[in-house]
Amino acid sequence: MHNSNSTAQPFGGMRRKEREITSREEIDGILASSTVMNLALSDNNVPFLVPVFFAYDGTAIYFHSAYMGTKMDILSRNNAVCFEISVDQGVIESDQACDFEAKHRTVIGFGKASLIEEMAEKVKVLDLIVARFTDRKFPYPQGSLDNTAVVRIDIDAIKGKKHGF
């Protein structure tokens, strides 16, 4: 199923319904307000988790990487990914030790990753990622472009959760 507007629950519904974010606008706001995404991959039943800078264009999530390394090796064998973005983290204290809770807004999604090969599209995505950090525009040396992998995650399912707001 490819539906970037999906709020499907791949592993069942959310247990604490009052914490579920059902508004796609609120989910998109969380995606827009963070620069780091935790990317989960799996290879031969072994999990691998890595933080990456990312961009979101309203339909897909993008990140860049070197072509060589564990992340790209795993993606070449298994392009199914899970991603997580959290913002506004904190602690909600209590008078009871076991009643402390995490304050957060979190988005978790599932999708399929694919390499972007076309150079103009790579540059467009790199511009989206750089724009998360600065308004400045940069030229990309051809050697850097040739050595940089740009990956698109087509979102199959996405959900949000918040607590403390």
Image (cartoon, rainbow, N blue to C red):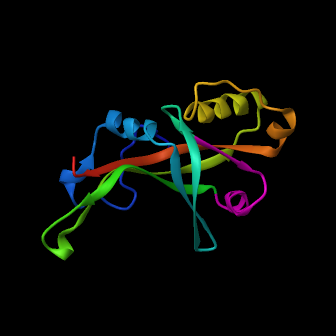
In magenta, the rendered stretch is 62-78
Residue shown at 83% from the left, 32% from the top: 141
- Could you tell me which residue is drawn at 71 percent across and 64 percent down? 70
Quadrant position of residue 97: bottom left
| Residue 14 in view in this figure | no
143 relative to 157, above or below: above
Give 117 or 96, whichever is nearer the viewer.
Answer: 96
Task: Work out which residue is located at the far right of the displayed protein and give it.
Answer: 143
Give the farthest residue toward the left: 95
Residue 157 screen position, x and y as percent = 43, 48
Residue positioned 31% across, 56% down in the render: 90
In the displayed structure, does residue 37 sit left or right of residue 126? Answer: left
Of 129 and 138, the residue lying toward us: 138
Specify whether residue 77 is painted magenta: yes
Tell me if residue 133 can be seen: yes
Which of these two is toward me, 79 or 99?
99
Q: Residue at x 68, y 62 (%)?
A: 74
Residue 49 locus on image (x, y percent): 56, 63
Residue 76 within the magenta-colored segment of the rendering: yes
**Left or right, residue 139 beside residue 92:** right
Q: Above or below — where is 3 with respect to 44?
A: above
89 or 59, nearer to the observer: 89
Left or right placement of residue 39 versus residue 91 in this view: right
Where 153 sits versus 58, above or below? below
Indicate the position of residue 3 as horizontal and vertical percent values.
46, 40
Residue 28 appears at what percent x and percent y? 40, 36
- Number of numbered discs visible in the structure rendering: 0
